[in-house]
């Protein structure tokens, strides 16, 4: 199959077998091979503006502390004390929005304290322990990268840097979401899907269902006749010209010079996306797999100012109550169907144009999945 070269020949392909969406052992393998080895979105640099600002993020079953250091650098560490393994930060939720600040992290167990760069600052009675060298004790680091202001972490020490992975997407985000690095968080829309993360990823990327399920999106935001999705080495890119003023579903101003006359989505394999709505209004999607049949979906909106304008509030509300809400019952229903004895594999239908009414993006998700899983699954 010619992926990732953007498109595939029209035809009928086959879905992955349903057990890959329902089998807990497959999910355990994905934790190790996919989630723990890929770049995950955990937040935005604006959430930790000052030294000592920190939050907890959950990545592939791990709790990670993300902190801005005294030197201004943003770092990440496993949330584990290097002494005997007590959790270090215990008072924060792990949703990325619950930000605290401190000069030192002090473990609740024996009060060892750590600087914001992860080095040990002190331990009670330390001077009395012969051979104890505080300089050799550090929190275990996790790789973190700032990507257009977004904070990404990767548990794999040898992972390819994200800015090298992102390639063409990075240039496009610079063009169409130029304010992302300096943006403010203004809203979150979230839902716990009763569906496997791959069901959610496939549904997010294919638009064959859009005209059926998303009437507001397809009549008032995107143009299904000119909406394209193309597979890339880093994920899948979606592009559609914005609807003209006489049919648009919210009051955006589309300015061709500023590039705000497009709907764009960059889905980064496997678990996050950056999306620009017409008018240049930016959100990020993040998917957090909880177990084989449960995925938390979080959409955060990033704007140039702390309070949304009337138009921005309109699209945030519209997205929450139409496209986002409409996909919820769909993916939950598909998950129940995949668990049925009456279904194993189905046809993936692709047209010659790889149009918006074609399911080639599912092959794109599959391409990335099988490349990451290697021999860990047989499709
Ligand atoms: S486990 Fe943290 S100080 Fe002992
Ligand atoms: Fe959808």
Image (spheres, helix red, strand yellow):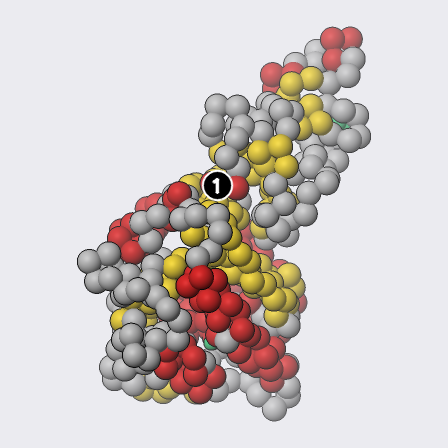
Q: Is residue 89 visible?
A: yes
Quadrant of the image containing the N terminus: bottom left
User: Dividing the picture into quarters, in which one does residue 224 lie?
Assistant: bottom left
Residue reaching furthest to the left: 257
The 10 Å Cα crowd at callout 1, few under 14, some 14 to 19, many 20 or more, is: some
- Left or right: where does residue 101 sit relative to residue 50? right
Q: Is 287 situated above or below 306?
A: below
Ligand 2 closer than 8 Å to label 1 CB:
no
Task: Give percent across and percent down for residue 227.
Answer: 30, 75
Q: Is 322 situated above or below 147?
A: below
User: Dividing the picture into quarters, in which one does residue 372 lie?
Assistant: bottom left
Image mark count: 1
For the point 31% across and 49% down, the residue is 178
Q: Is 101 situated above or below 189?
A: above
Q: Secondary structure at mark 1?
A: helix
Please give the residue where the numbered disc 1 appears in the rendered image. 46
Task: Give percent across and percent down for residue 328.
Answer: 57, 75
Residue reaching furthest to the bottom: 342
Q: Foreground residue, 203 or 17?
A: 203
Task: Give percent across and percent down for residue 64.
Answer: 60, 42
For the point 48% across and 48% down, the residue is 306
For the point 32% across and 46% down, the residue is 164
For the point 21% across and 62% down, the residue is 256
Q: Is residue 275 visible?
A: no
Task: Give percent across and percent down for residue 330.
Answer: 55, 80
Q: Foreground residue, 29 or 190?
A: 190
């Amino acid at each position: 199959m010619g992926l990732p070269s953007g498109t595939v020949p029209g035809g009928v392909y086959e879905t992955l077998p349903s057990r890959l969406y329902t089998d807990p052992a497959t999910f355990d393998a994905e934790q190790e091979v996919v989630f723990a080895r890929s770049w995950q979105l955990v937040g935005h640099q604006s959430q930790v503006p000052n030294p000592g600002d920190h939050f907890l993020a959950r990545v592939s079953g791990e709790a990670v502390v993300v902190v801005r250091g005294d030197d201004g650098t943003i770092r990440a560490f496993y949330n584990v004390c290097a002494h005997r393994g007590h959790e270090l930060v215990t008072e924060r939720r792990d949703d990325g929005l619950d930000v605290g600040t401190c000069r030192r992290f002090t473990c609740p167990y024996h009060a060892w304290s750590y600087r914001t760069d992860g080095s040990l600052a002190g331990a009670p009675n330390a001077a009395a322990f012969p051979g104890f060298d505080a300089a050799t004790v550090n929190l275990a680091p996790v790789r973190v990268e700032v990507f257009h202001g977004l904070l990404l972490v990767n548990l794999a020490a040898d992972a390819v840097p994200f800015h090298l992975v992102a390639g063409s997407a990075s240039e496009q985000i610079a063009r169409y979401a130029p304010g992302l690095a300096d943006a403010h968080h203004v809203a979150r829309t979230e839902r716990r899907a009763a569906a496997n993360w791959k069901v959610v990823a496939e549904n997010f990327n294919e638009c064959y269902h859009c005209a059926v399920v998303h009437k507001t999106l397809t009549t008032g935001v995107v143009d299904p006749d000119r909406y394209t999705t193309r597979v890339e080495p880093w994920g899948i890119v979606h592009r559609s010209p914005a609807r003209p003023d006489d049919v648009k579903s919210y009051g955006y101003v589309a300015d061709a010079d500023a590039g705000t006359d497009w709907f764009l989505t960059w889905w980064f394999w496997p678990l996050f996306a950056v999306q620009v709505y017409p008018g240049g209004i930016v959100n990020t999607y993040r998917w957090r797999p909880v177990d084989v049949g449960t995925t938390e979906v979080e959409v955060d909106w990033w704007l140039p100012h702390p309070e949304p304008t009337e138009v921005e509030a309109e699209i945030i509300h519209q997205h929450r109550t139409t496209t986002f809400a409409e996909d919820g019952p769909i993916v939950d229903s598909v998950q129940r169907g995949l668990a049925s004895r009456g279904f194993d594999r189905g046809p993936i239908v692709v047209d010659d144009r790889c149009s918006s009414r074609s399911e080639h993006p599912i092959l794109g998700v599959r391409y990335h999945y099988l490349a990451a899983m290697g021999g860990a699954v047989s499709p």
